[in-house]
């Protein structure tokens, strides 16, 4: 069987296949690249109809990355999926505490999820940072609570938790809140690879070296 073997050729062909599904959505060039990367990561062109972002989301995330802002993730899969050679050019760190024993004990003591306890622990460190959530709706709910009640303002929230319990509601709340630049997906779709793909897409907008 003959098949494409070169990574960039595979990627370029994939983007050619995705392009017609974005036609008519009136996207900017930057938005098109972020949408395309999300669809590529999911293998699902149905994402084209459910991706939502605030008008300032891409520029806010780009600016944060360029100034070396940290990224705080809910699970290790998001951290693992971010392209480190691109991210490391700007001096930030990617933080995740989901497996930290102290966080596990805190979550047990408070009757919450570990992802939620981790976001509480990050607290004011989220100010001016990028929050990338790909798994846990509870983490997104907690970040939004801190924004409302404690006036903590991340530079941007990539809020794309997946699943049937709380995911759709948490993402709807993110979009409705609207005071922090955000990128999300309506409904139950999402996941860590999709959240990471957003960060990677914006990193590649800054500098397409891999």
Image (cartoon, rainbow, N blue to C red):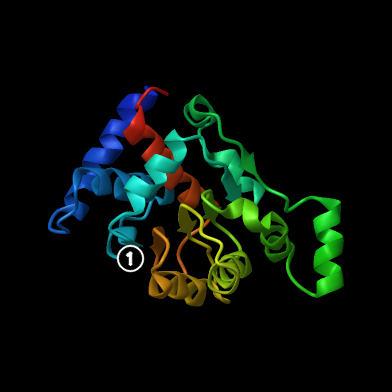
SS class, disc 1? loop
Above-or-below relation of 200 to 146? above
Provide residue 100's location: percent of width, then percent of height.
80, 50
Quarter of the image that includes the C terminus: top left
Which of the pair 143/204 is nearer the observer? Answer: 143
Which of the pair 153/49 is nearer the observer? Answer: 153
Quick check: 168 left or right of 79?
A: left
Residue under the point 40% across and 35% down: 203
Quick check: 44 left or right of 107?
A: left
Which of the pair 18/192 is nearer the observer? Answer: 192
Residue under the point 85% across and 55% down: 102
* Quarter assignment of residue 123: bottom right
Provide residue 148's location: percent of width, then percent of height.
53, 73
- Crowding at dot 1, Cα within 10 Å, few <14 / some 14-19 / many 20+, comes out as few
Quarter of the image that includes the N terminus: top left
Above-or-below relation of 8 to 189? above
* Quarter assignment of residue 206: top left
Mark 1, residue position: 50
Quick check: 161 left or right of 26?
A: right
Q: Is residue 2 visible?
A: no
């Amino acid at each position: 069987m003959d098949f494409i073997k070169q990574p960039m050729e595979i990627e370029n062909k994939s983007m050619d296949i995705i392009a017609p599904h974005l036609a008519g959505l009136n996207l900017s060039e930057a938005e098109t690249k972020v949408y395309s990367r999300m669809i590529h990561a999911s293998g699902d062109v149905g994402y084209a109809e459910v991706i939502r972002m605030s008008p300032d989301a891409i520029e806010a995330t780009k600016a944060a990355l360029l100034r070396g802002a940290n990224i705080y993730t809910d699970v290790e899969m998001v951290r693992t999926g971010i392209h480190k050679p691109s991210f490391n050019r700007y001096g930030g760190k990617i933080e995740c505490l989901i497996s930290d024993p102290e966080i596990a004990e805190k979550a047990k003591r408070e009757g919450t999820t570990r992802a939620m306890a981790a976001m509480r622990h990050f607290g004011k460190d989220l100010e001016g940072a990028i929050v990338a959530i790909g798994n846990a709706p509870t983490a997104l709910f907690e970040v939004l609570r801190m924004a409302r009640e404690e006036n903590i303002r991340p530079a941007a929230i990539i809020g794309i938790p997946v699943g049937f319990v709380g995911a759709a509601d948490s993402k709807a709340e993110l979009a409705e809140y609207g005071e922090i630049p955000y990128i999300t997906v309506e409904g139950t779709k999402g996941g860590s690879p999709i959240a990471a793909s957003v960060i990677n897409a914006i990193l590649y907008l800054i500098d397409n070296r891999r």
